[in-house]
């Protein structure tokens, strides 16, 4: 039995397999619509989330399965003080696979040690969010046709942005990749992420506070939101939240085939005027999230 | 100050100054009947100050755990008044339930009956990280 806690739990070959399967699902949806008939996915969301939960549920429904679960801790036994371990022991008796989001870092790992069914980490605080990374990878694969020889700009909250850390970890395994880290000084990429995934592998990188300066060289621009819930101090959040705003004027500085990704939801960091630019791939990315989760569910249920 | 030489026992030397009580607690030396001497802030050419623990008796301990507390530690096994063995102290790959994670966002801060586990992330620098949240020890 396999779990997915961290994107690095998957080899690059397994990621290729998931991407291939997701592409096949997109091309041949009918082939997959009954594979998970009579199977149940439990979505245990101890922290609210719209798109991740709905994309998991849509994924299971499109595979012919059913879903059950809760969408916030207050509607679960966690509000009565039940531990993650106990919740998972009980739920794994009812479902065939579990997707868990929890505000505490490491909660899905605890769940994996107690569960009789596969656990998918659907986000644990500021730590990991591997299915978002799979979504990002599928989008890069479909939009750029390769993971190699890409210059990837990551912009915004690189300190608390778990999707950024996971994407760097995943992309650092491909050849010819270069990172451009664009953030305010206060939200710089943590030293250990840089040390573990960039410096130790000799991957070229640049660090800058200027989005405009970085844009011309990028093949992929990964924008992120400064997340209020990651700050203990409201003042710091207010000061930093609008550090970067991508506008049509700034897009003129970018390559004609650059793509803009964003894990969504966005607030102000991408002007809605950019949405009509064909390089704005973030809504296509959100759609890809469902397909890659379908592929992942199939893999963990050993259907592929 | 004079502490008698021990005939049969263990000398834990080169402990970072001030950490001898951590080791005393970790090894639960207070539960033994044999004499235990703790020397604190002993002048040392290499370390400036060091602590030493002398235990007048033999018992089984996980010496690698000592390396986690203070990587400079050396351990001498004494028999009939002579050093018969010098233990090589290495950093353990994993330590369990010795320290707790300080990250308030970590699941180990709230989950009941959880083991507090840290893994060796960088042997050269002696860096341990929480197995749940990856925060530095």
Image: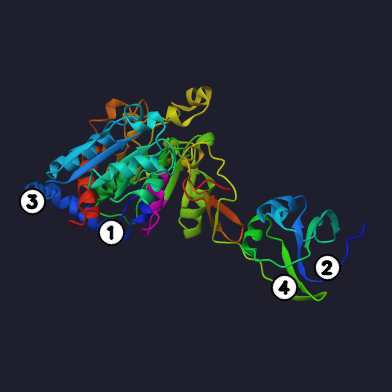
Q: Are marks 1 and 3 in contact (CB under 8 Å)?
A: no
Q: Are marks 2 and 3 in contact (CB under 8 Å)?
A: no
Disc sitting over residue A14 in the figure: 1
Q: Secondary structure at mark 4?
A: strand
> Mark 4 and mark 2: span between their CA atoms?
15 Å
Residue A194 coordinates in the image, percent (x, y): 50, 50
Looking at the rendered structure, whether the residues under marks 4 and 2 are on a common chain is answered as: yes
Residue A215 coordinates in the image, percent (x, y): 39, 40
Q: Residues within 10 Å of mark 3 (few under 14, many from 20)?
A: few
> Mark 2 and mark 3: span between their CA atoms?
78 Å
* Mark 4 belongs to chain: B
> Mark 1 and mark 4: span between their CA atoms?
47 Å
Q: Is residue A284 visible?
A: no
Disc sitting over residue A31 in the figure: 3
Q: Which residue is mark 4?
A: B86
Q: Is residue B134 visible?
A: yes
Disc sitting over residue A91 in the figure: none
Residue furthest left as drawn: A30
Q: Residues within 10 Å of mark 1 (few under 14, many from 20)?
A: few
Q: Which residues are magenta?
A: A164-178
* Mark 3 belongs to chain: A
Q: Secondary structure at mark 2?
A: loop
* Mark 2 belongs to chain: B
Q: Which residue is mark 2?
A: B6
Q: Nearer the viewer, mark 3 or mark 4?
A: 4
Q: Secondary structure at mark 3?
A: helix
Q: Are marks 4 and 2 in contact (CB under 8 Å)?
A: no
Q: Does A94 sit left or right of B37 as displayed?
A: left
> Mark 3 and mark 4: span between their CA atoms?
67 Å
Q: Residues within 10 Å of mark 4 (few under 14, many from 20)?
A: few
> Mark 1 and mark 2: span between their CA atoms?
60 Å
Q: Is residue A257 magenta?
A: no
């Amino acid at each position: 039995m396999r779990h997915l806690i961290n994107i690095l739990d998957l080899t690059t070959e397994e990621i290729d397999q998931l991407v291939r399967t997701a592409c096949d699902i997109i091309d041949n949806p009918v082939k997959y619509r009954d594979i998970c008939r009579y199977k149940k996915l439990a979505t245990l969301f101890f922290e609210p989330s719209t798109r991740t939960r709905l994309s998991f549920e849509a994924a299971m429904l499109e595979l012919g399965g059913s879903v059950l679960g809760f969408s916030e801790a207050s509607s679960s036994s966690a509000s009565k003080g039940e531990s993650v371990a106990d919740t998972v022991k009980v739920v794994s008796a009812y479902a065939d696979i579990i997707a868990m989001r929890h505000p505490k870092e490491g909660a899905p790992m605890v769940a994996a040690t107690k569960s009789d069914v596969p656990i998918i980490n659907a986000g644990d605080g500021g730590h990991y969010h591997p299915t978002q990374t799979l979504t990002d990878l599928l989008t890069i694969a479909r939009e750029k046709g390769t993971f190699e020889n890409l210059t990837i700009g990551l912009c915004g909250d690189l300190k608390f942005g778990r999707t950024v850390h996971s994407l760097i970890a995943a992309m650092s395994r491909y050849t010819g990749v270069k990172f451009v880290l664009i953030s305010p000084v206060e939200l710089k990429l943590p030293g250990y992420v840089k040390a573990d995934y960039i410096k130790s592998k000799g991957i070229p990188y640049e660090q800058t506070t200027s989005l405009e300066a970085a844009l011309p060289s990028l093949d992929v621009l990964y924008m992120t939101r400064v997340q209020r819930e990651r700050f203990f101090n409201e003042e710091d959040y207010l000061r930093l939240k609008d550090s970067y705003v991508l506008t049509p004027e700034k897009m003129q500085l970018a390559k004609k085939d650059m793509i803009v990704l964003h894990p969504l939801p966005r607030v102000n960091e991408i002007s809605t005027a950019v949405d009509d630019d064909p390089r704005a791939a973030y809504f296509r990315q959100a759609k890809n999230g469902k397909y890659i989760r379908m592929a992942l569910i199939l893999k963990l249920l050993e259907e592929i | 100050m004079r502490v008698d030489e021990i005939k049969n026992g263990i000398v834990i030397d080169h402990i970072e100054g001030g950490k001898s009580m951590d080791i005393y607690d970790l090894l639960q030396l207070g539960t033994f009947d044999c004499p235990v001497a703790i020397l604190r802030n002993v002048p040392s050419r290499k370390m400036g100050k060091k602590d030493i623990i002398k235990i007048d008796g033999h018992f089984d301990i996980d010496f690698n755990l000592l390396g986690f507390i203070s990587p400079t530690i050396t351990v001498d096994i004494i028999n009939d008044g002579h050093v018969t063995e010098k233990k090589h102290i290495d950093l353990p790959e994993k330590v369990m339930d010795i320290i707790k994670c300080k990250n308030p966002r970590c699941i180990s801060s709230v989950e009941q009956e959880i083991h507090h586990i840290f893994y060796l992330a960088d042997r050269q620098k002696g860096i341990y990280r929480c197995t749940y949240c990856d925060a530095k020890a």
